Image (cartoon, helix red, strand yellow):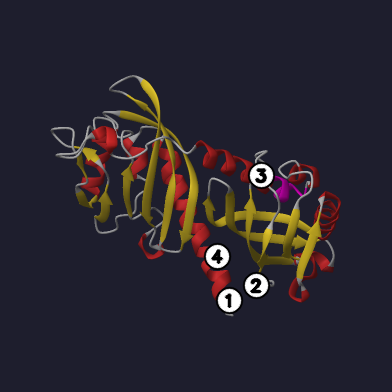
Amino acid sequence: MDFDLIRREGELSKAAAARVWRHADTEKLSDIKAIMATLSGGDGEITYAMPMPGPNGEMTIPPGTTLADAEEHYRLNYSVRNHIRWEAFVELRKPWYVFFEGVEHYNDLLTGEKVEGHSITFFQTAPDKGDGIQGEMGWSRYPELPGYTARVGEDASTVCDASVPRSKAANLALFRRLMEGLRQGDPDAVLATMCDDPQCAIRNQVDGDDACLLGLAGAPALRAHLVRFAETFDVLELDIANIVTGDWYVFAELRWVVRERSREGQVRIFHTAEFLPVSNQSVFSGRVGFGTPFL
């Protein structure tokens, strides 16, 4: 296994996600000039393909290849809605792209309503093209696209089940609470996201390169492990490398940067990849997965 490659890809993927989230967070300002500043077209070329209502309300996805095309997209987009925020319950991060599936919250200016839209988006983030995104391509499920009625010859009422997947959004929020507990070294916060008798099989990262699969049956065993981890490491950074949020589970690859509390405070980097089933009490039933040695 090429651990140098994993480390380098983790660093580049984190940087790619930072570009995308800077862009996504700027969109809620409805400031086209500020949004355009999060794009890196270099020689003026970019790749854009976003759904827009056609003249008869039909779904269209016109391609754009210049910064001027992207600016026109935002001008049209903000004539019908104001973006509020994104919840990405699927987020796949690579050095050259980030893929979202999630819920977009926005104000529909045509109706005055607040809307939750279920969308997928592909962002290009080529690191050699500057510190912004190089492209954005998306698709929205009917009927979240303002002004969209149906494709030609299509019954809009039968396009698809467009209900927002609330269970996925709730599971994502639960996982972010768990992440914050891990980041803060707070066993109580982590256990608050778990059932009373969590079952875990995870890598014992405390033992570093000599770690093995660790079985943790029940809350006392998990607490003891979390306490030992917090006594061993100070978490400097904890970032999502990839995440898939389902109706009944979360799978996530996390990138950790920690400082050892002994050994003269040496900084270590490693990745973990685990799935966490969600119980019918809307908490995690356990953690199952493994991790890398120190990279």
Q: Nearer the viewer, residue 247 or 183?
A: 247
Label 2's element? loop
Q: How many residues crowd around disc 1 within 10 Å: few (fewer than 14), some, or many (20 or more)?
A: few
Label 1–label 2 contact, CB within 8 A: yes
Location of mark 2 (residue): 295
Q: Amino acid at mark 1?
A: Asp
Label 3 – label 1 distance at C-alpha: 37 Å
Residue 175, x across and y down, in percent: 63, 46
Q: Nearer the viewer, mark 3 or mark 4?
A: 3
Eye-nearest disc, 3 or 1: 3
Q: Earlier in the sequence, mark 3 or mark 1?
A: 1
Mark 4 crowd level (few <14, some 14–19, many ≥20, 10 Å Cα):
many
- Looking at the rendering, the stretch of residues picked out in magenta corresponds to 180-185
Residue 256's x, y, as percent? 66, 60
The residue that appears at 46% across and 57% down in the rendered structure is: 16
Asked whether the residues under the numbered discs 2 and 4 touch, taking CB atoms below 8 Å apart as contact, a structural biologist would say: yes
Q: Which residue is mark 4?
A: 10
> Residue lying farthest bottom?
1
Give the residue type at disc 4.
Gly
Q: Secondary structure at mark 3?
A: loop
Q: Is residue 27 above or below residue 273?
A: above
Please give the residue where the numbered disc 3 appears in the rendered image: 279
